[in-house]
Image (cartoon, rainbow, N blue to C red):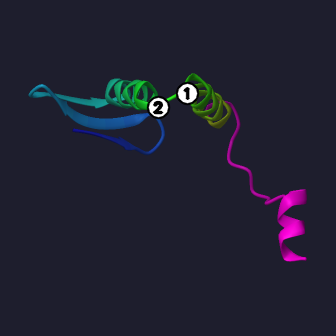
Amino acid sequence: MMASIEKRTGVGSLIGTQVQGFLAWWIWRNYYLAGLPTLHKKIRVLVDWIIDMLFRSDVTMLKTFSEEQRRI
């Protein structure tokens, strides 16, 4: 059983061993990536995680062209 808590922190129990902190977060992330069905999805999630680590949260919401078309 594993859980990701906040940024780069996690808790879990692996085969009866308690893990916490960065190590638990890292294990959870790798397990999640391994469970994704295709290489394309794994790469998309990994890139999203890397962008999330490098840049802070975006405070603006940009409308895309497809969102504007849905309203018409």
Query: Rounded to the nearest whole Å, what is the CA distance between mark 2 and mark 1?
Result: 6 Å
Whether residue 66 is in magenta: the answer is yes
Give the x, y percent position of residue 69.
Answer: 89, 67
Answer few, some or many: residues within 10 Å of disc 1's Cα (few below 14, many 20 plus, some between 14 and 19).
some
Residue 63 can be seen, yes or no: no
Q: Which residue is mark 2?
A: 36
Residue shown at 40%/30% (left/top)? Answer: 35
Is residue 1 positioned above or below 18 on the image? below
Query: What segment is highlighted magenta in the picture?
Result: 53-72
Q: Which mark is residue 42?
A: 1
Q: Nearer the viewer, residue 53 or 64?
A: 64
Residue shown at 58%/31% (left/top)? Answer: 41
Q: Amino acid at mark 2?
A: Leu
Give the x, y percent position of residue 19.
Answer: 22, 28
Answer few, some or many: residues within 10 Å of disc 2's Cα (few below 14, many 20 plus, some between 14 and 19).
few
Is residue 6 positioned above or below 9 on the image? below
Residue shown at 23%/35% (left/top)? Answer: 12
Q: Quadrant of the N terminus?
A: top left
Of the image marks 2 and 1, the number of the one nearer the N terminus = 2
Q: Using the rendered view, name the quadrant where residue 17 is placed.
A: top left
Is residue 60 positioned above or below 25 on the image? below
Q: Using the rendered view, name the quadrant where residue 65 is placed.
A: bottom right
Residue shown at 38%/27% (left/top)? Answer: 22
Residue 64 can be seen, yes or no: yes
Determine whether label 2 and label 1 are within 8 Å by CB.
Answer: yes
Q: Tag 2, which secondary structure?
A: loop
